[in-house]
Amino acid sequence: MIILVPLAIVIVAFAVANRQSVTVSFDPFSADAPAASLSLPLFALVIGLLIVGVIIGGVASWLGQGRWRGAARRLERELRALRAKLSAYEGMADGPSGVPRASEPPAPLRLRPPA
């Protein structure tokens, strides 16, 4: 709310102050009678171009971070495989070999007194 309300006020003030119509031409060869042109209010043009710029920037950023997302997926797979191996090793330690698990304290040492 602290950011959105002042931003909305600025956008509405900009739209009210820039209601005049502008013509955007897509024909670089004929300035007098363009083959493709668009007439719209100035505020609509500026806000529309701002939205398009944010979308293009977001897509470029998402594409640029692709290798990091791939590395994260690869590391997650490796982590799952290592956890599975660790579970298998812990299961082997519980077997009849008599090797205590790391979480169990060692048995106390009992010595006979000297004779």
Image (spheres, grey):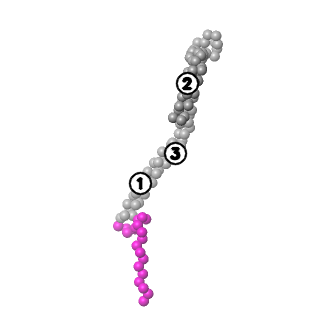
| Numbered badge on residue 2 | none
- Expressed as whole percent of the image width and height from the top left, the position of residue 74 reads 49, 46
Label 1 belongs to which residue? 84
The residue identified by callout 3 is 71
- Measure how far apart labels 1 and 3 are at the Cα level: 20 Å
- Residue 81 location (% of width, % of height): 44, 52
Tell me whether circle 1 and circle 2 mark residues in contact (CB < 8 Å).
no
Q: Earlier in the sequence, mark 2 or mark 3?
A: 2
The answer for how far apart the CA atoms under marks 2 and 3 are is 44 Å
Residue 104 quadrant: bottom left
Q: Secondary structure at mark 1?
A: helix
The residue that appears at 59% across and 16% down in the rendered structure is 20
| Predominant SS along the magenta part | loop
Name the side, left or right, on which 97 lies relative to 41.
Answer: left
Residue 63 x %, y %? 54, 36
Q: Residues within 10 Å of mark 3 (few under 14, many from 20)?
A: few
For the view shown, which residue lies furthest in the left direction?
A: 96
Q: Nearer the viewer, residue 60 or 39?
A: 39
* Numbered range of the magenta stretch: 96-115
Residue appearing at x 64%, y 13% in the figure? 31
Q: Visible in this render: residue 45?
A: no
Residue 77 included in the magenta stretch of the image: no
Label 1 Cα crowd, 10 Å radius (few <14 / some 14-19 / many 20+): few
Q: Nearer the viewer, mark 2 or mark 3?
A: 2
Q: How many marks?
A: 3
Which structural element holds mark 2? helix
Q: Is residue 108 magenta?
A: yes
Q: Amino acid at mark 3?
A: Ala
- Number of the front mark, 1 or 2: 2
* Residue type highlighted by circle 1: Ala
Residue 66 lies left or right of residue 99; in this view the side is right
